[in-house]
Amino acid sequence: MPATPHATPPRKRLVRRLTATAAALAATAGVLSAAAPAGADSAVAADSAQSGKQRHGRTVDVQLLSFNDLHGNLEAPQGSSGTVTETQPDGTKKVIPAGGVEYLANSLRTARKGHEYSITAAAGDMIGASPLMTGLFHDEPTIEALNKIKLDATSVGNHEFDEGRAELLRMQRGGCHPKEGCFEKGKKFRGADFPYLAANVTDEKTGKPILKPYTVWKHKGVKIGIIGLTLEGTPDVVTAEGVKGLKFHDEVETINKYAKELDRQGVKSIVTLIHEGGMPASGSYNYDCDTPGAGAGISGPIVEIAKKVTPKVDALVTGHTHQAYACTIPDPSGAPRTVTSAASFGRVYTDTTLTYDRRTKDIVRTSVKGPRATNHVVDREQPKAADMTRLIDRWKTLAAPVANKPVGYISGDINGRGSEAYEKPLGDLLTDAQLEALAPADKGGAQIAFMNPGGIRSDLAFKASGAEGDGVVTYGEAFTVQPFTNMMNVVDLTGAQVIAALQQQVSGPNEPQPKILQVSRGLTYTLDLTKQGADRVVASSVKLNGTAIDPGKTYRVAMNEFLAGGGDGFPAFKEGKNKLVGASDLDAFTSYLTARSSAASPLAPPKADRITIVK
């Protein structure tokens, strides 16, 4: 079963929560307290073996390297979040450890060798929902790493808005943080060397794009237009504060508008970076989603978008769903067009060959031939990029006083982000922590806790990530699981509203791709996948501590503020009354780990048996 697409709340309170942390780092790590931007055979464009220079024939192959959804994962991700699945010739599956910017940088640099015409681009969510090592410093380390990788352009994703427009503009333009100042003595954050593209994001008052809608990559007469945008539904997956004063426009209309503008400028070769994606029928990175026909093995929003986008666009680089695919979906004229995605966390990159016709200035795309795209694993058997190792070590040293503090103990891997199941073991642990923190009468009197699955950003791995020892959970690891610092809310909901919320997991906007909430201990129900829509949740099966939920009774229900605002397609939660704001989700989690575990008595992975699945 494919992993639930991520759609998560922002980390908008990081500044407030880490004020004390910033002060501590100022004393221990020198933190200051203030202070690319229909033709002939491509063989004629091959590299000359003698001179190493490309001959200027009718066509030339342009290499497009792409990735998406890095989320600040500079270090190799832990647990199943740091692996990819490869289907073998005999049909068996092989799990490969992958990811980490030291390996991603080496993979991209190696892939570029021998390619004079090479573009590196990304499809959003480079930052946001990041591990502590970069999240603590508002993702400045991630932008620095992407500069070193020589990224040519990226689109914005929903997570680029986690801390609001002003912070996104700082990521582009540079400058030290407005409240926490500069993080390294004598160094001012210079911002991104590459353009962040936000074609469909405009200011509500002026109607103008907040960032460049496109850029044009040029080399020796070859010009490739690159349009970048995020999903129109970004406001549905980011809290209101993160998108305040902004308007998000239709993806197809926006792409077609700017493709026409580029065409008028004489730029005939166009690539679109779009932070919206699909779900392939298989979780293997090397699955052929064109079997049995073009695009037959992929579903989701990107399919209809790809079918409608103007033929002027030659390739679509996508993201958001954290899946790996290299598909061919015909454009409105019927010509083949690649639609690709490279999983997430730097575990995969895509290599697409765009054959550029110097006479037409367009990419060769006929009814039988189009761009060729292949996904490659960023394995950890290759050498590390030394400059990335130095970058990581530098920032880890700054973060160490906070990141390395032990907060709990576990007896085995507790899978969250890496789990493909609807109910995740880590989801059980997190909701139990929230329930315990908010159950006391003076803390809200919670009886039930719900959590959106996309809010779980990683696994808890038993194997030590540093020198802390196996089974030790550090503050940095806990932060990586829940990096948003959402404040917890406790509200009154009727039993009917609780059932309605559960039904909204599999109906309305969530029907095509269910978002199954994680539930606290005591709440049980049956999810019948043989049925359709809201009927998939068997209303009569919803029980609390063995007793059927009473539609007319009022229950105290805990959830993060993102869910309480109706985020992720749960309007029932907006109907809550008598709201009490409690501790942050991260504080609830770390407190639970500390109180409930020790070196002698570690927490065991939960059984994940609260939701009964009928297939």
Image (cartoon, rainbow, N blue to C red):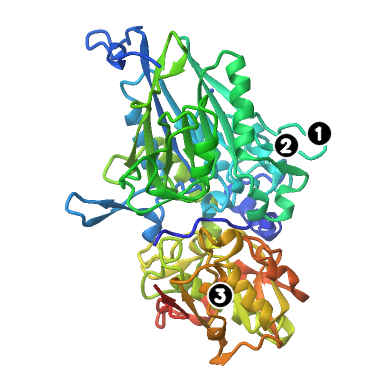
Judge whether 5 appears above or below 383 on screen.
below
Q: Which residue is pictured at 63% across the width and 52% down the height?
A: 27
* Picture quarter with the C terminus: bottom left
The residue carrying mark 1 is: 206
The picture quadrant where one finds residue 338 is top left
For mark 2, what is the residue? 202
SS class, disc 2: strand
Frontmost of labels 2 and 3 is: 2
Residue at 38%, 28% (x, y): give it.
371
Q: Amino acid at mark 1?
A: Thr
Q: Amino acid at mark 3?
A: Thr
Q: Farthest bottom residue?
A: 547
Whether the residues at callouts 1 and 2 have beta carbons within 8 Å, the answer is yes
Q: Is residue 293 left or right of residue 561?
A: left
Q: Nearer the viewer, mark 3 or mark 1?
A: 1
Which residue is painted at 37% across and 48% down in the image?
297
Q: Secondary structure at mark 1?
A: loop
Q: Which mark is residue 537?
A: none
Residue drawn at x 17%, y 53% as measured from the top left: 90
| Residue 43 vertical placement versus 564 (above, below) | above
Q: Amino acid at mark 2?
A: Thr
Mark 3–mark 1 distance (CA, rounded to whole Å): 42 Å
**Looking at the image, is mark 2 or mark 3 earlier in the sequence?**
2
Residue 431, label in figure? 3
Q: How far across and how far down the image is residue 369, in percent? A: 34, 26
